[in-house]
Image: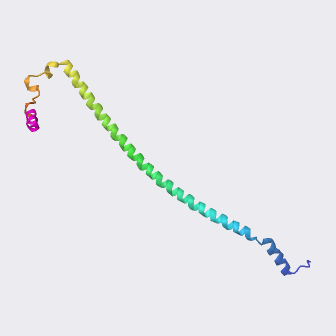
Amino acid sequence: MSDKSQLEKDIERRELVKIPFSVLVLIALLSVALGSLGVYTFKLKQDIGIRELEIRSRDQVITSIKRSLDNEKSEFLAIIKALETGKERVKADPESMSGGPDTAPSVSAPEKGRKDSAK
């Protein structure tokens, strides 16, 4: 048997298990740092989510603008094609487009009004 009493054994065990104060402070600082790091990453994830939503909305605006530009482009191409076919018709039959005095523009009435208002 050992010549140590139960009290001595308990004291020795506690000395072996006893944690120094500096180690406790270090553990506390590390836990605070990990907590703040967790809060920071959570905030970053929220900011990233908000920015992703902004990017998606901008992408939607960009795609709608592209669609409208494509629609306008197709409309302009249709107008150009119609005008080109009109020119071809004029080249083929120039007499149908040339008319008599009915087709000449009349400018007499508006110009008189301008001269009177200038005086």
60 to the left or right of 95 = right
The quarter of the rendered structure image containing the C terminus is top left
* Image quarter of residue 108: top left
What's the image's color scheme? rainbow
Does residue 49 appear left or right of residue 119 in this picture?
A: right
* Res 72 quadrant in image: top left
Residue name at image x 56 percent, y 62 percent: 39
User: Was residue 71 drawn as part of the magenta stretch in this picture?
Assistant: no
Q: Specify whether 17 is left or right of 49.
A: right
Q: How many marks?
A: 0
Q: Main secondary structure of the magenta part?
A: helix
Q: From the viewer's side, name the closer residue of 63 and 18.
A: 18
Q: Residue at x 32, y 38 (%)?
A: 71
Image quarter of the N terminus: bottom right
Compared with 39, 10 (above or below) is: below
The percent coordinates of residue 22 (x first, y second) are: 73, 68
Q: Position of residue 104 (x, y in %)?
A: 11, 25
Q: Name the foreground residue: 22 vs 108.
A: 108
Confirm whether the magenta stretch covers residue 116: yes
Q: Magenta residues?
A: 110-119
Residue under the point 81% across and 71% down: 16
Instruction: Give the percent coordinates (x, y) of residue 54.
Output: 44, 51
What is the x, y in percent for residue 45? Answer: 53, 56
> Viewed as shown, does residue 48 lie left or right of 19?
left
Q: In the rendered view, tell whether residue 8 sits above or below residue 19.
A: below
At a point 69% along the width and 66% down the height, the residue shown is 27
